[in-house]
Amino acid sequence: MTALTSAWTALLNDPHALLETVIIVGIVSVASIGFVTGLRELAHDLGNLRKAKV
């Protein structure tokens, strides 16, 4: 618990580190949402491909 507490203290004391952390978390969040959406679209397209039986 002290490591987590000291990490928060370090982030709050250094605004640049906090900004970098927020930017990285935002990028990872957007990438994760895009990845999951892509997987859902792939599953949907595969279902349609099976139905079409070209």
Image: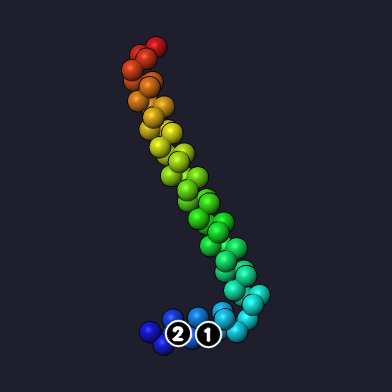
SS assignment at label 2: helix
Where is residue 54, by image quadrant? top left
SS assignment at label 1: helix
Where residue 34 sits: x, y (%)?
A: 50, 45
Q: What residue type is labelled 1?
A: Thr
As drawn, is 32 to the left or to the right of 1? right
- 46 w.r.t. 8: above or below: above
Where residue 19 sits: x, y (%)?
A: 62, 70
Disc 1 target residue? 9
Label 1 Cα neighbours within 10 Å, binned few <14 / some 14-19 / many ≥20: few
Label 2 Cα neighbours within 10 Å, binned few <14 / some 14-19 / many ≥20: few
Relative to the observer, which residue lies in front, 3 or 15?
15
Residue at x-position 35% and y-position 25%: 47
Disc 2 target residue? 5
- 19 w.r.t. 50: above or below: below
Residue at x-position 53% and y-position 62%: 25
Where residue 23 sits: x, y (%)?
A: 60, 63
Where residue 1 sits: x, y (%)?
A: 38, 84
Q: Which amino acid does label 2 sit on?
A: Thr
As drawn, is 1 to the left or to the right of 24? left
Is there CB contact under 8 Å for labels 1 and 2?
yes
